[in-house]
Image (cartoon, rainbow, N blue to C red):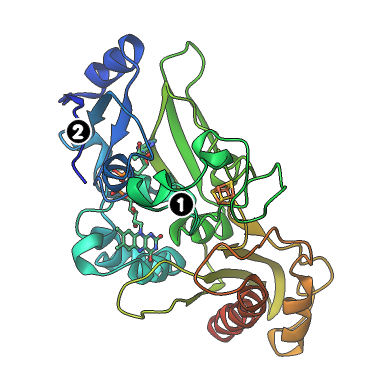
Amino acid sequence: MRLPYFELFEPATVPELLTILKREQVRPLAGGTDILPLMRFGLLQAAKLVSLRNLPELKGIERRGETFSIGAMTTLSEIAGSPIIEKDAPLLHEAALAVAAPPIRNVATIGGNVFQNSRCLFYNQSAAWRRERQPCLKAGGEVCLAVPGSRKCFSVYQGDIAPALIAAGAKVQIESKKKGGSREVPVEDLFTGRGAQPLSLRSWEMATHFVVPVLQNTGSGYAKFRLRSAIDYPLAGAAAFVVARKGTIASARLVLSAAGPGPVIVPLDGVAAGKRPGEIDLDAIGRAIPKNLPLVNNHILPASYRREMLSVFAKRAMKTALDRV
Ligand SMILES: Cc1cc2nc3c(=O)[nH]c(=O)nc-3n(C[C@H](O)[C@H](O)[C@H](O)COP(=O)(O)OP(=O)(O)OC[C@H]3O[C@@H](n4cnc5c(N)ncnc54)[C@H](O)[C@@H]3O)c2cc1C
Ligand code: SF4
């Protein structure tokens, strides 16, 4: 599988990047661990890529008062190896350490991880495999190969970082070539809820930084189920985050990975807030996970088993968060 021809732009400053965004139909290239395999497989056609690697403004971790500003091009190894992130944003630290394996984390960036495509066993296949079958909805066809007769795509978002960012209340800064389009939005707003097109960012927009709150009196935990523990996407992932005041839980958040076309925020009304950590019923955390998650048999393990594992790993993540608060 050869990488198709593409034109590469390599701006050295953000104004130069914005000029390219205004002028060209380009796609961002960060570490390349997601986009280049998709291009090799013929699943993504991009005639022009813009590399972000020569832009120092998009790299690094900076503490600004009660937040961290993390450049979109900061690698997951830098995040996993940062003592200040480990101390004051431990959920992000734990999630970064759970991604793939060190060789991938050394090049994969936080921006690229959040903006990675959703996955399906009937879609993430070689061109030779797909040539023998009809193109599915996500590939521009009329059918879903996983659920024959369905007009909906059930591709699954398997990023580890976005659930952790959402649980911690992080935001993302977006640059746009359109006047007035630059903005800061909660990370959850990046997801459309549609499997075929899981991300809401437009082709003329790009993330520059993630703004992650530094919070006192919090506890957090990230729990991940994967087949190969040394390197694998989550088949179920859970990020739990709790804030305590005077020994009582003031607020709690639970966000799942591999539970649908984007990270799933579990409603925890009446389950955690107002209780002491020891009073929280972990089975109620599992029961709070929506029953109608759009999981089908399009991954290596059956949907029913993955659904069960989401509950198990959600409880583990929440228990860790409560133990740490
Ligand atoms: C073997 C293997 C195992 C993996 N295991 C895991 C895992 O366990 N957990 C997990 O979460 N992921 C996993 N991944 C996915 C991997 O972590 C992501 O591919 C990686 O983080 C993507 O980062 P990147 O910098 O390489 O992004 P790229 O491949 O460069 O980009 C990915 C996408 O993001 C877009 N993009 C990049 N930067 C920006 C930006 N600043 N603004 C807007 N769009 C942007 C690109 O255009 C592209 O569409 C695995 C990948 C492989 C190959
Ligand atoms: S769920 Fe169906 S439409 Fe979506 S990628 Fe898989 S086979 Fe294609």
Does dot 1 land on a helix, a strand or a loop? strand
- Please state the horizontal and vertical placement of residue 174, each as a whole percent of the image: 44, 30
Amino acid tagged 1: Val
Question: Could you say which disc has been placed on residue 292 in the image?
Answer: none
Of 47 and 169, the residue lying toward us: 47
- Please state the horizontal and vertical placement of residue 90, each as a whole percent of the image: 42, 69
Alpha carbon distance from label 1 to label 2: 21 Å
Q: How many residues crowd mark 1 within 10 Å: few (<14), some (14–19), many (20+)? A: many
Q: Residue furthest front?
A: 132
Q: How many residues crowd mark 2 within 10 Å: few (<14), some (14–19), many (20+)? A: some
Q: Is residue 190 visible?
A: no
Residue drawn at 21 percent across, 33 percent down: 4
Identify residue for label 2: 55
Asked whether, in this view, residue 303 is left or right of residue 214, the answer is: right
Quarter placement of the C terminus: bottom right
Residue drawn at 50 percent across, 61 percent down: 164
Of 102 and 127, the residue lying toward us: 127
Total marks drawn?
2
Does dot 2 land on a helix, a strand or a loop? loop
Q: Quadrant of residue 94?
A: bottom left
Tell me whether circle 1 and circle 2 mark residues in contact (CB < 8 Å).
no
- Please state the horizontal and vertical placement of residue 246, each as a whole percent of the image: 68, 77
Q: Is residue 206 visible?
A: yes
Q: Quadrant of residue 6?
A: top left
Asked whether, in this view, residue 129 is left or right of residue 29, the answer is: right
Amino acid tagged 2: Leu
Identify residue for label 1: 212
Of 123 and 54, the residue lying toward us: 123
Residue drawn at 27 percent across, 49 percent down: 74
Asked whether, in this view, residue 18 is left or right of residue 234, the answer is: left
Q: Nearer the viewer, mark 1 or mark 2?
A: 2
